[in-house]
Amino acid sequence: MNSRPEPVTTDLRRRYLDLLAGCLSRDLFLNLDEPWVDPADRNEGRDWPKGAETMIGRRRLDNLIDCLTVVLDDDIPGDLVETGVWRGGATILMRAALAAWEAR
Ligand SMILES: C[S@@+](CC[C@H](N)C(=O)[O-])C[C@H]1O[C@@H](n2cnc3c(N)ncnc32)[C@H](O)[C@@H]1O
């Protein structure tokens, strides 16, 4: 067995954020939690989720991940802020990105 840890790459970090986005939006559990939800509506952020931590939908979460990747890979200085948090899902995703890139 190879005991050398795998290097943490941008691809690995994005896969983690992608999984988290699926959890925060409940995109991954639609059939279990809200079988009546139209996946297209959730994707576009057009519904009002019962249990999800974010209402912005998968498409905007994916865009946020793209933006975070550029900011953190290019070491762009500054802060991340969400104005209008609802249940805080987008902020949770941003905090996770900071942790994944080991940024503060
Ligand atoms: C479309 S939701 C987005 C929520 C959040 N970004 C997410 O991940 O689900 C917009 C949020 O902004 C809040 N909001 C709208 N206008 C606001 C204002 N003037 N000041 C503070 N919050 C506001 C709303 O109450 C709501 O929670």
Image (cartoon, grey):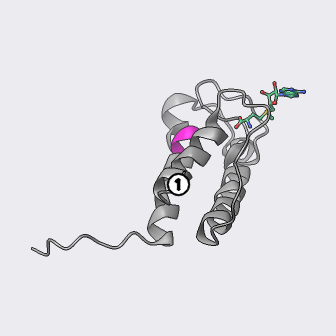
Residue drawn at x 70%, y 44% is 57
Please state if 65 lies on the left or on the right of 56 as rendered: left
Residue 20 percent coordinates (x, y): 51, 47
Which residue is rendered at x = 49% and y = 71% of the image? 11
Q: Residue, x 63% and y 31% (percent of image)?
A: 36
- Does label 1 point to a residue whose CB lies under 8 Å from ligand 1? no
Residue at the top extreme, as displayed: 50
From the viewer's side, name the closer residue of 66 and 101.
101
Q: What residue type is labelled 1?
A: Leu
Can you tell me which quadrant of the image ligand 1 is in?
top right
Q: Is residue 27 in view from this perspective?
A: no
Q: Quadrant of residue 52?
A: top right
11 relative to 25 in the view: left or right: left
Q: Name the residue under label 1.
A: 17
Segment tinted magenta in the rendering: 22-26
Given residues 56 and 12, the one toward you in this image is: 12
Q: In which quarter of the image is the N terminus?
A: bottom left
* In this view, 10 is above or below 25: below
Circle 1 packing at 10 Å, graded few (<14), some (14-19), many (20+), is many
Q: Position of residue 61 (x, y in %)?
A: 67, 50
Residue 23 in magenta? yes
Rendered location of residue 95, percent (x, y): 56, 45
User: In the picture provided, is 70 more to the left or to the right than 103?
Assistant: right
- Residue 66 in percent (x, y) is at 67, 63
Question: In the displayed image of the protein, which residue is found farthest to the left?
Answer: 1
